[in-house]
Image (spheres, rainbow, N blue to C red):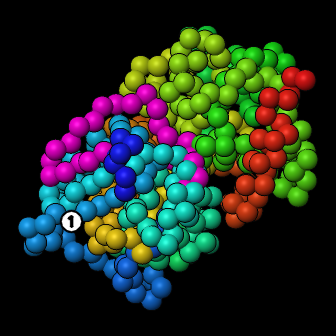
Amino acid sequence: MSKAKGKMKKWMQGLFASSLALAVAACSGGGQEQKPAENNTGSQGGGQTAAQPSEQPAPSNEPERLVIYTGRDKNIFEVVLPQFNEKYPNIEVETLEMGAQQILERVRAEKANPQADFWWGGTQSALSTAANEGLLESYKPTFADQIPDLYKDKEYRWIGEMLLPEVIMYNKDALKKEEAPQDWDELLDPKYKDKIVIRNVLPSGTMRTIYSAMIYRQGPDTPEKGYEWLLKLDANTKEYTQDPTNLYLKLDRQEGVISLWNLQDVLLQGLKNNHPYDFIYPKSGAPILVDGIAIVKNAPNTEAAKKFMEFLMSPEIASQLAKERFQFPARSDISKDQLPEFMQTLELKPLDIDWDVMAEKEKEWMQYWDENIKGKGKK
């Protein structure tokens, strides 16, 4: 992996430097296009038999290496990576941060010569696409049975780490809760014209999921109805921001007061980073994005990737991320008393979506939006 561009960051043997970032690349959740690579996992039975990775660091004096392509943010790194380094001081971790869609594209481009070992933070759509293209390793981890079937690949080529409900986000200093849109269709009300700012859609897994879901809910067999809906949303949209940081800046300045985003990040930015944000969980339900993880096929450092997967998905880390970073765990065996109170009471009502259809149609739908809808609603 090239270090010349300054994008790679090392986390080695307890030497960890990080600061809370204003942005969470979501999905996973804010995805980009990239690809996974293949590893020599030694998974048994095509991923159908649970495998237990070694718990001991390699006896060699030479450190192991682990390269992670990630859509997660530094505020997640600072919880997970120091603890992983403490348990495995002989594993040198490098991260390259980008959106989920960018990861898919990069892993795809590197298929013949994989550079990454682990994909941390990808949308269900991006991961499913990568799996179907033969870019991900089939590996059944020890915790696999604790992940509901809805949140994992049948062949264990990817596993859901957390759930990301997509919600309506608003600046609570500018709007009262009852003044904000209460459901998706209310976003089209002319009273919200130029009050909506949106994170640039194509590079973002979160936004691609939301926009594809808006098309799907109008009828996946008749996307024209969904395109018409998005054209009306575009008419009310003041600006598409380059990245989450700029999205937050616009909302803070009240250059826009409404957006669409994932619930975890709304809570994180509002409660941890002191932004004036609150959310509306849409009455009709929300697309609940599965933010997942995977081992790249033919990855150079498969064993280190397995160790990281097991560590990241442990109940202890899942509970800590829920309490400290508002992360809804995909594991079904986390005790409620190990979760924050709002998670115990919030009903995650999902939109009825066929995610396989979404994965199949997303590229076509988003290309049409980019070429024919973006910036044209006001004309």
Q: Main secondary structure of the magenta part?
A: loop
Q: Is residue 80 magenta?
A: no
In front of the other: 168 or 212: 212
Reading the image, the residue beneath label 1 is 64
Tell me if residue 62 comes above or below residue 164 in the rendering: below
Q: Residues within 10 Å of mark 1 (few under 14, many from 20)?
A: some
In front of the other: 88 or 148: 88
Q: Within the image, what quadrant is residue 116 found in? A: bottom left
**Whole-percent x and y of residue 344?**
46, 43
- Residue 249 shown left or right of residue 353 in the figure: left
Q: How many marks?
A: 1
Q: Is residue 15 magenta?
A: yes
Q: In the image, what residue type sits under mark 1?
A: Glu
**Whole-percent x and y of residue 113?**
45, 70
Residue ranking furthest to the front: 4
Tell me if residue 12 comes above or below residue 176 in the rendering: below
| Screen quadrant of the C terminus | top right
**Whole-percent x and y of residue 317?**
30, 52
